[in-house]
Every structure is written in structure tokens, then in C-alpha cells.
Image: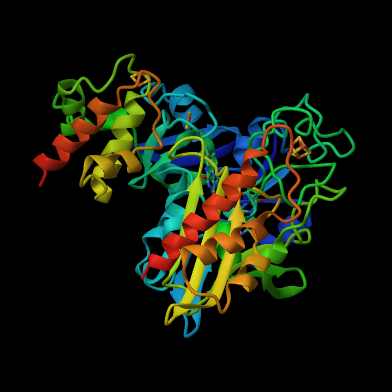
Amino acid sequence: MTPFAYHASPDEQDAIASAVAGGRYIAGGTTLIDLMREEVEEPKRLIDINQLPLHDIRETADGLVIGALARMAEVAAHPAVARMQPLLVETLLEGASPQLRNMASIGGNLLQRVRCPYFRTLDAACNKRRPGSGCAAIGGINHNHAILGTSDHCVATHPSDLAVSLVALGAVVRIRGPQGLREFPVEALYRLPGDTPHLEHTLSPGELIVEVFVPYGPYAQRARYLKVRDRASYEFALVSIAAALEIDAGVVRQARLAAGGVATRPWRLAACEAALVGQPASQATWRKVAPLSVAGARPLSGNGFKIELLQRTLVRTLELAGEAA
Amino acid sequence: MATSEIELTINGHLQRLSLDPRTSLLDMLREHLALHGTKKGCDQGACGACTILLDGKRINSCLTLAVMHNGAHITTIEGLANGAELHPLQAAFIEHDAFQCGYCTPGQIMSGVACLAEGHAASPEQIKAWMSGNICRCGAYPGIVSAITQTANASR
Ligand SMILES: Cc1cc2nc3c(=O)[nH]c(=O)nc-3n(C[C@H](O)[C@H](O)[C@H](O)COP(=O)(O)OP(=O)(O)OC[C@H]3O[C@@H](n4cnc5c(N)ncnc54)[C@H](O)[C@@H]3O)c2cc1C
Ligand code: SF4
Ligand code: FES
Ligand code: FES
């Protein structure tokens, strides 16, 4: 690990000033320390933000507010979350392990980095780690890589489960930076790799995620997360779907859908959502919209199976969501 | 490189240490305090061999820095027995042959203690799900699940 200076920040103002001066935030450390040990990440100064008052989970009139430093386990065990957004509980408990969920923060989860094995192998070509060096995954082992949102420069999937469900639910991230507070949809936090895969998110230097707002909607109680992976637990998704439906008198009124494990960022399935509205809540409908989920998919040598798996996972998740509540 | 001063309570004993900030909690235990019970399997959060209790919660000690935990209370496998009397889960591991090589065992037991305390040991299925952060390359899983089940039943 490359040496660094350590600073435990007492408040937001100090943290932001320290980060603007070139420091790097650390929350749970479960992404950052792992990559620092491999020397993929080499921050000169670590800003420990754990003393900041960003741990709360609270209910408002129209949704849930989750502090950026709340731990995955705390959010999953919180009664208000279980009551208002059961999808988040299911999603969080499908991720990582009980130990990691006790450590990992919500802000860190959203900004976790890709699990592409070449990204963490210093002598492999990787445009994300070393811009311009190439992408070893495209001609290499790419069983786990993306079929959607890829470029000729990077094909790594975004690994967060939580981000998939937050995108489906239309959640908003609240950011504090040197210029004050701003907020935007979680979906807008992520960039496509294009020809700049080393740029992953839309935060400016020093910007701090302070909280996530999850609006309540009539679809929240009919929502499921299904995660398909190479082993039953403690593994990232090959394909995952978050689906939330509003069904009235057997007809779909609203659908919120996103996919994980298949794309370079959490992937909103907008065409499927639109096609579901007004249709009967039935197997036939679920099957009819599934092909829309893979529009524009570009399989690699080792991940063509994801085209079929994504559609089947979508059908199954819609089936489960249709039965929920 | 400057060192950082920290103070932690480990298995009931207050410890003062001066550490390079790069030191993980795991390396602090093993290299600086000679508490070798906590194991290093992967050093990447992927196996659970390094599981300890930090302020009562199970964590992977390999993925956190010691300097981030000034003032914390830590329990390791060495702190579980009461003198010569084993913790009930330690005794159950022996009774159920819940290990072969034993390398994953301290992590399994610490994770199992937390799993019981969290109330996630109501059935073998629940135990499997909530113990999935601990890998056993020898495949001693059936014994591990029955040791935890017995301990859960005994405390009911
Ligand atoms: C073995 C293993 C298995 C895993 N399995 C899964 C899984 O199945 N599903 C899943 O979703 N995740 C999984 N994870 C990833 C895990 O969820 C993330 O590592 C974790 O959520 C990151 O949170 P953290 O608080 O530890 O982040 P840190 O490591 O502290 O930080 C991560 C990044 O976010 C930045 N950051 C942190 N907080 C903020 C903030 N408030 N504002 C701005 N920047 C911030 C840091 O600077 C850093 O760049 C797994 C991890 C491991 C090691
Ligand atoms: S897929 Fe992206 S992260 Fe993986 S090697 Fe290619 S450029 Fe690097
Ligand atoms: S050594 Fe920490 S999880 Fe493997
Ligand atoms: S007993 Fe050998 S790894 Fe579990």
C-alpha cells in the first residue's frame, strides 16, 4: 500500500475543504482499502468521514431519507425501510455478506468501483485504471462483463445492487460541495464509459454524498429484486432486476424497472416500463415486453448468455412482483 | 511515514499503540499484538477468516484500518472463552466436528456468535444465509450449521 496521511474529519465543512485540497473520502473502506492494497488506488490523504452526522435514516411525508453513512445492515434492518420500501431490504440483503454489510456505507456503495479482474491487475491493459492502455477484458475473460452501455474502451459492469433498486425507485442523491447543496436522480450519478472510462461518476472534486431520498410511490409495496449469480450468495450479480409495479384491477398502472450485472451503469429499462402501462398483469404481458430489455445489447465472446438470462430474469421478477403485496 | 497513536479495548484489555496508518485491524491484531487466532485468508473481504466483533458487530478486520477505530471495543476468538471454560459455540464446534483444517474456524465462530446474537439462527436455512460470509474450503458446513443450531436451541 502506498503511504498516505490520515485525517479524521470533525464536520462537513472540514471534510469538503480537505477533499477539495486533494484528500479522498473514506467511509467503510471496503472498496477503497481493498484497491489501495492492490495499489490500484493511491490516495495521498484519506479523509475519514465517519464522525460526520450522516448516519440517520428517517421518514418524511413523501419518502425516506437515508444518510450517506448509514450502513447497509442498518438500512436493511430499519423498520421504516421495511414498511415503506421493502425492495431496499431485499436488495441489500442480497449483497455482499453480513460482515461487509455492517461496514459498508450507502454513499460508498453507490461509489464502489468495478469488479473487473483486469482493473485490479496492475500489469493488465485497462483504460479505466490507465487511460489509453487498452481493455484486456474485451479479448479476455468477460463472462461477468456488460452487454449494454459498453464502448470499445471499457465493458465493465457497475457492481452495486442497491443502485439498481434506487434507480428503479427514482431515488435522488443529495450532494454537498464547495458550492453548496445540490441534488439529482441516482441515475444521473453514473456516466457511460465512452472513451473516458476512468471517469465514472458526475461528482466534482470534493463533493460529498450526504443523503439519498427515496420517494414513496404506489408501486413500493409490489416490488421485488431478483439476483442471479454464479453461486447462491456472497457474489455479484450476473443479472439482476429490480421491479416495482402499480397494479389496479388487474391492469398495470405504473412500472419501475432497472437491471444490474448487464450494463456499465445501473440500467433503467424505460422501454419495458412504457410498454407495460395499461396492459393486463399477466404472464403474456411479461413475456411480450422482455425482448425490449435487450435492445442494443452487444455481447462479448464470453457473455452472450446474458441476452437470454436478462429476459428470463425480467419475466420472473415481474411475475414475483405481480404476486407481491 | 508518521505514525498515529490509538487506544483500543481488545478482549477487555486497554491497548495503546503507535501505528503506521496503513495497518489494517487484522495486521494490528496479528503483527502488533500477537493475537494470531484471527486468520488472514484472502485479505480482500472475500472469505470471512478475519471476522472479529467491533463494538459488538461482526466485521472483516482485513478491510478496515486500525486508525479508524480509536476508542473501539474489539472481541477476537481469544476473548471468547471464560478462563478455561469454552464459549458454548466453541464447545459445540468440537462436539459437531465443525472443522477439518481449522483455518476458517476462528472466523466461523466469531461470525456464529454474532449470528446468534442478531437472532439470525432460527432455522438451518437462516443460518446458512447469515453465515454465507464465511467460506470453508474443507466443506465443514454441515457441522458448522448443526453447532450453531444446537447453541441457538440451548439458549432458547
Ligand atoms: C467480497 C465483497 C463482496 C461484495 N459483494 C457485493 C454485492 O454483492 N453487492 C453490492 O452491491 N456490493 C458488494 N460489495 C461492495 C460493497 O457493497 C462496497 O464495497 C461498499 O458498499 C462500499 O462502501 P464503503 O462505505 O465501504 O465505501 P469506501 O470503500 O469507504 O468508499 C468507496 C468509494 O466511495 C467514496 N465515498 C464513500 N463515501 C462517500 C460519500 N459520502 N461521498 C462521496 N464519496 C464517498 C470513497 O472515496 C471511495 O472512492 C462487495 C464487496 C466485497 C469486498
Ligand atoms: S472492462 Fe473496463 S475495467 Fe475491465 S479491463 Fe476493460 S477498461 Fe479495464
Ligand atoms: S481475510 Fe478478511 S475476508 Fe478473507
Ligand atoms: S475447516 Fe478448513 S477451511 Fe474450514
> Which residue is more in the foreground, B52 or A102?
A102
Quick check: A268 left or right of B153? right
> Which residue is more in the foreground, A121 or A25?
A121
Quick check: A117 left or right of B7? right
Q: How many marks?
A: 0
Q: Residue at x 57, y 64 (%)?
A: A166
> Which residue is more in the foreground, A257 or A170?
A257
Q: Position of residue A280 (x, y in %)?
A: 49, 74
Q: Position of residue A284 (x, y in %)?
A: 51, 64
Residue B12 appears in view: no
Q: Is residue B37 above or below residue A298?
A: above
Q: Residue at x 75, y 32 (%)?
A: A137
Residue A206 appears in view: yes
Q: Quadrant of ligand 2?
A: top right
Q: Position of residue B48 (x, y in %)?
A: 42, 32
- Write down the quadrant of residue A5 in the picture: top right
Quick check: B72 left or right of A195? left
Q: Position of residue A121 (x, y in %)?
A: 71, 27
Q: Residue furthest right?
A: A132
Q: Is residue A247 above or below residue A233?
A: below
Q: Residue at x 47, y 71 (%)?
A: A281
Q: Quadrant of the N terminus of chain B?
A: top right
